Image: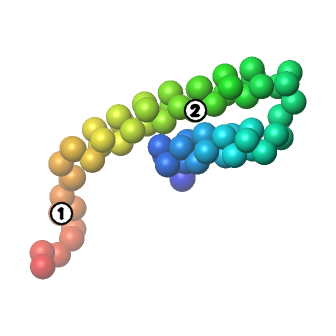
Amino acid sequence: MSLVTSTDTKNVVQLIDVVAKRGAFEGGELATVAALRGRFVQLTKELEGVEANLAAQPQPVNPNQEAV
């Protein structure tokens, strides 16, 4: 199973920025797009915190793995 990472959400924010800069949205859509972008920015921050916590945790040892 594939999970969404902070890199994925950063890419969505960058995509929104690029298409907005190119004029892909009409005026009436801008508020909705800005709100969606804001939610992805917040999600990115939350995911970065979770990923940092996971990286800081000791990794479990696999008892079936041979020692090298």
Q: Quadrant of the C terminus?
A: bottom left
When the figure is inspected, residue 4 is found, relative to residue 67, above or below; the finding is: above
* Residue occupying image coordinates x 61% and y 45%: 14
Residue of label 1: 63
Up-down relation of residue 4 to residue 36 (above or below): below
Q: Amino acid at mark 2?
A: Phe
Quadrant of the rendered image containing residue 28: top right
Left or right of 24 in this view: 53 = left
Q: CA distance from mark 2 to mark 1?
A: 39 Å
Residue 25 visible in the picture: yes
Left or right: residue 31 compared with residue 46 = right
Compare residues 16 and 22 and report the one nearer the observer. 22
Which residue is depicted at the point 83% across and 34% down?
25
Q: Secondary structure at mark 1?
A: loop
Query: Please, what is the three-letter code of the amino acid marked with disc 1?
Result: Pro
Tell me where residue 22 appears, x and y as whole percent: 78, 45
- Mark nearer the N terminus (2 vs 1): 2
Residue 36 drawn at (x, y percent): 67, 27
In the picture provided, is 33 more to the left or to the right than 66? right
- Residue 58 lies, in percent from the top left, at 18, 48
Q: Give the residue number, with chain letter if any, for mark 2.
A: 40
Residue 8 as seen in the image, left or right of residue 17: left
Q: In this rendering, which labeled residue sits more in front, label 2 or label 1?
A: 2
As drawn, the residue found furthest toward the left would be 67
